[in-house]
Amino acid sequence: MSAVLREAKVPLVSSQDCKKNYGSASITNNMLCAGILGAGVDACQGDSGGPLVCKKDNNRWYLVGTTSWGWGCAGRYYGVYTNIARFSKWIKAKVK
């Protein structure tokens, strides 16, 4: 574990590619996948709950996911994140 806050730049991966990558593991619409296989850059144990953010055309950053799970770190599998868009109504209701 690092004593310094770190960041990793990882591209979003299509749901279809993620499902192929994980095979029998259940990748649902409530999840997003991100990463570059074998690139050595990924979320890892201890990162759960951390943000996955994307910069939009308006030059603003948006929370699109939270680190959820993966098999190993920066290896043969993509990182799996909770898809925030699927829970936005629930989140808004809870933070009122």
Image: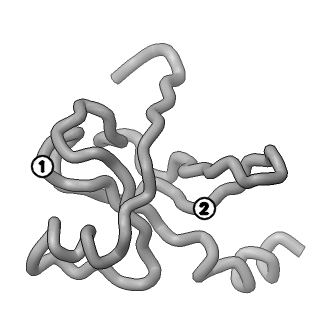
Q: Secondary structure at mark 2?
A: strand
Q: Quadrant of the C terminus?
A: bottom right
**Residue 25 x %, y %:** 16, 76
Q: Is residue 9 above or below residue 35?
A: above
Residue positioned 70% across, 78% down in the render? 88
Marks 2,1: beta carbons within 8 A: no
**Residue 23 x %, y %:** 10, 75
Q: Which mark is residue 87?
A: none
Answer with mark 2 or mark 1, whichever residue precedes in sequence: 2
Image position of 53 (left or right of 71): right
Q: Which mark is residue 64?
A: 2
Residue 1, quarter of the rendered image: top left
**Residue 33 x %, y %:** 37, 62
Q: Secondary structure at mark 1?
A: loop
Q: Residue furthest top?
A: 3
Residue 62, quarter of the rendered image: bottom right
The residue identified by callout 1 is: 76
> Badge 2, how many Cα within 10 Å: few under 14, some, many 20+?
some
**Numbered label tally:** 2
Question: What amino acid type is highlighted by mark number 2?
Answer: Val
Question: What amino acid type is highlighted by mark number 1?
Answer: Arg
